[in-house]
Amino acid sequence: MKKFLTMIAALMLSFAAQAQTMNVVVGNTIYQFPAAQVGDMNYSEGTTLTIMGKTFATTDIAQAYVDESEVTDNTVSVKYSDQTATVYVAGNVAQYVTPAISGAHVSIEQSTDVSDDNVGEITYSLSGSSADGEFYLTGSYKATVELNGLTLTNANPVYSGAAINIQNGKRIDISAKKDTENTLTDCTSGDQKACLVVKGHAEFKGKGTLNIYGNVKHGIKTGEYMTMKNCTLNVLKAVGDGIHANEYFLMESGTLAISGVGDDGIQAEVDGTTATGETTDHEDEDSGNIYIQGGTLTIATTAVGSKGIKADGTLKINEDSSTTTMTITNSGGVDTSDSSDLTSSACLKSETAITIAGGTLTLTNSGQGGRAINCGNDNGSGALTITGGTIEAKATGSNCGSSSGGGGRGGWGGSTSSNHKYAKAIKAEGALTITGGTVNASSTNHEGIESKSTIDISGGYVYAYAGDDAINAASHFTITGGFVMGNSSGNDGMDANGNFYIKGGTVFAVAASQPEVGIDANTEGGYKLYVTGGNVIAIGGLENGSSLSQTCYQASSYSKGTWYGLYNGSTLVAAFKVPSNSKMGSGLVVSTAGTTTLKSGVSISGGTSIWSGFGNVDGTVSGGNSVNLSSYSGGNGGGGFGPGGGFGPGGRW
């Protein structure tokens, strides 16, 4: 005891004289008290020492010394080194944190007394490396966790099995510091929910890199919402989802890469029993929504039924002025574990609605029965709205199961059985609306673009290629603007199971051979195709019984692979190239709002390429030969023009 008193007296003299920092060592924790802040120190009855509100039992103090180290207020630093960790606690927060250290497993209890009225937010700075450690934090007030060059693997689940586990229901900043690379790996056993767990809402930020390896379940799991800004986040392995967030997920900027996962790339789900929907400034929001406002995303999923991005609520992409670059691949195919209710994989999936307002999206699904975009559920919700951006959506997989229920001339399109899933590039259970942007959709074995409700296109550039209907609406289909092409190698170019209205825009439809037609309406159900405006190009003709208030014309033949110029009088409407599909309707119908003329074999230079290279606008079109056109009265029912087709020898026109 006398020795301890002598040590304290000497330290206090040195401390006061040199205005330095007093370090009090308790186990592997070092409490650091700057001279300017200390004031009186209370040494009571030889058993305790109190400094800045922190009381130490003298028997716990292993060492005390003074040095010139700088102390940052409100900071707790954890430095990992192989099998050990050392915790440095700034003096002004010493009374509010209680570290417990076992090897490199660090647990810190943050006092419930922490608030705006005393010290405010505490920052926990983690650095160093350990192959058998973790960081576990409890508390009830917001905090920041800085990753400052950290490589941490939990090999022994002393506390939780996670590499970082924040059991604090408030806002937690996870900040990857600039120019640092940080790697987290959880234990290969245990009941942890993720490699990195945050009980509350997590905001990922900083200008460094964070790599995640999840060995038991998810890569990252948040009990409330998760946001991301600036940082680079790589989820390189997860048995479950790469990122699983309750309430909602929002990405403002940064770089996010997800691969090696056993389920979805990103999933957001409703935390409570009732969804709030989107709220003002996301205050108290519990929507299951996903907001992608900017940044670069690269996601690859391979599990059956998996989704690259899955929102239990609404998925919104680029609704502000930021730039999003998104590349998602999915090869998972159909989940057949429930044979009565198969589940398709998808690059993008929302249960309620999807809105795409900008960005560059490259979405490829090669799995059996997979979709690039899948919007909605069986209760009829699922509006898909595209107002901008560039979207490449491909479904290259085969179909899964067999159909039941007729689809009219389209066959599978009307099927209602649940024991099959068809590979479609874009599918919406609700209304599909396109007002801008560029959409290129292709499906080798089924529809390119399909809505189980209505389709309305008023702007943008839309191209769809498919082995079935290129573009299909289960109800009415309306085009009032934009440039729209449907190119089918096995069915109708464009098909409506209700009425089909062409009121404006430029429409290019290519059908397979008879009985398919370029533009089809459900005449069997008492509906019609109405052409009242716009520019129309239809290989395979128009549906029988069409109502044509705008004059249409027919050409007796066309040549595959040839460029044509369609003119309204002397004004070029569009240049188009006839595909070279193995099966194509033998008729060509064209129409413009004025005097329609057509030239074949034209040459094109400059301008804007559209329709995946089958069209051009604003370019210089020269040469070519005029095509003889004759009046067209409104439908061949898919018969076509030419030998065996109708308008030529052996025909029935």
Image (cartoon, rainbow, N blue to C red):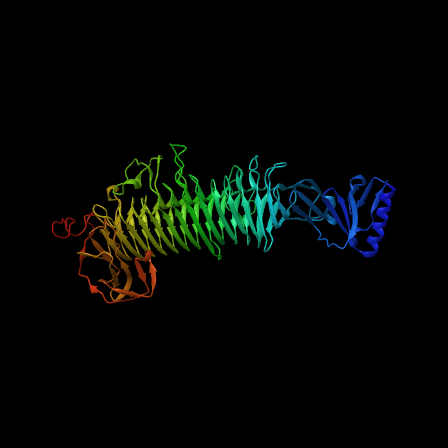
Q: Hey, which residue is sitting farthest left in the picture? A: 649
Name the residue at 80% across, 44% down: 50
Horizontal side, residue 423 vs residue 602: left or right: right
Residue 456 x/y as whole percent: 35, 50
Q: Nearer the viewer, residue 157 or 168?
A: 157
Q: Nearer the viewer, residue 558 or 641?
A: 558
Residue 300 x/y as whole percent: 45, 46
Image quadrant in which the N terminus is located: top right
Name the residue at 47% across, 50% down: 298
Residue 556 x/y as whole percent: 17, 56
In this view, 468 is above or below 618: above
Can residue 537 be seen at all in this image of the molecule?
A: yes
Q: Nearer the viewer, residue 216 or 85?
A: 85
Can residue 481 be seen at all in this image of the molecule?
A: no
How many numbered discs sit on the rendered protein?
Answer: 0
Q: Hey, which residue is sitting farthest right in the picture? A: 2
In this view, 396 is above or below 615: above
Horizontal side, residue 225 vs residue 440: left or right: right
Residue 200 x/y as whole percent: 59, 42
